[in-house]
Amino acid sequence: MAKIKIDFNVLVDDQKILDQKALKEILQGNKEKVIKIAKEKGIDVEYLYQSIKKEFYNIKDDLCISVAVDAVVFFKEDNVYNIFLVKRKHEPFKGYYALPGGFIELGESAEEAITREVKEELGININIKSLITVQSKIGRDPRGQTITIAYLCEAESKDAMAGDDAEAYKIIPINYAIELAFDHNEILEKAKKILM
């Protein structure tokens, strides 16, 4: 899938051109501004965020590697492990279910990032139990070279609510067969070996 071309000379927020100060605010964690712009322009939030970072630092796409986090969020009920999945609102893999996760933001650790992403996408708190894997295969993300750090996390609550770039969520038994976005089936298989 071809990337959306973003012209930073015409990207407008409140009728003002995004200047260096605005870009710096975004890079320092003002994700609300990114979400607002992305919704106005019909662009994937995470893609816009990463693109702004590349533009700000004048890094060429082919020289930039993104780092993301993903989580297998589980709870045990009646001796069965259940997991949360989120339905993707944007491309790539729009409409597919995936593990909750996203890109690490400037100034946060991987553990902080996955805690934030799960909270944004599911509205629940988690306890990180262990590292599942680091996935770095070239081509795993059509947006560009992306490394993901995957964690096994226990949910503190089953009462979730889809938010951010998650259109919906569902809970399934961990052994339920479903085709997931990216290489998330592979991550899930590795998680099963830890849990079961």
Image (tube, grey):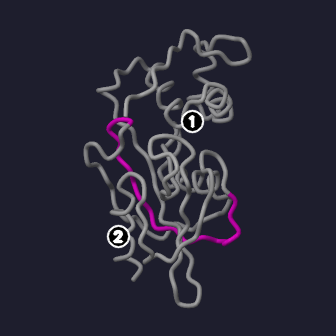
Q: Position of residue 159 (x, y in %)?
A: 71, 69
Q: Amino acid at mark 2?
A: Glu
Q: Nearer the viewer, residue 139 or 63?
A: 139
- Where does the N terminus fall, quadrant-wise? top left
- Where does the C terminus fall, quadrant-wise? bottom left
Q: Residue at x 32, y 53 (%)?
A: 135
Cα separation between marks 2 and 1: 28 Å
For mark 2, give the secondary structure.
helix
The residue under label 1 is 45
Q: Is residue 144 above or below residue 93?
A: above
Mark closer to the chain start, 2 or 1:
1
Q: Is residue 136 magenta?
A: no
Q: Residue at x 61, y 25 (%)?
A: 41
- Per the rendered image, the range of residues in magenta is 143-161
Q: Residue furthest right?
A: 14
Q: Position of residue 39 (x, y in %)?
A: 65, 31
The residue under label 2 is 189
Left or right of 67 in this view: 138: left
Q: Is residue 100 above or below residue 102?
A: below
Q: Residue at x 46, y 56 (%)?
A: 70
Q: Amino acid at mark 1?
A: Val
Pointer 2: residues within 10 angstroms few (<14), some, or many (20+)?
few
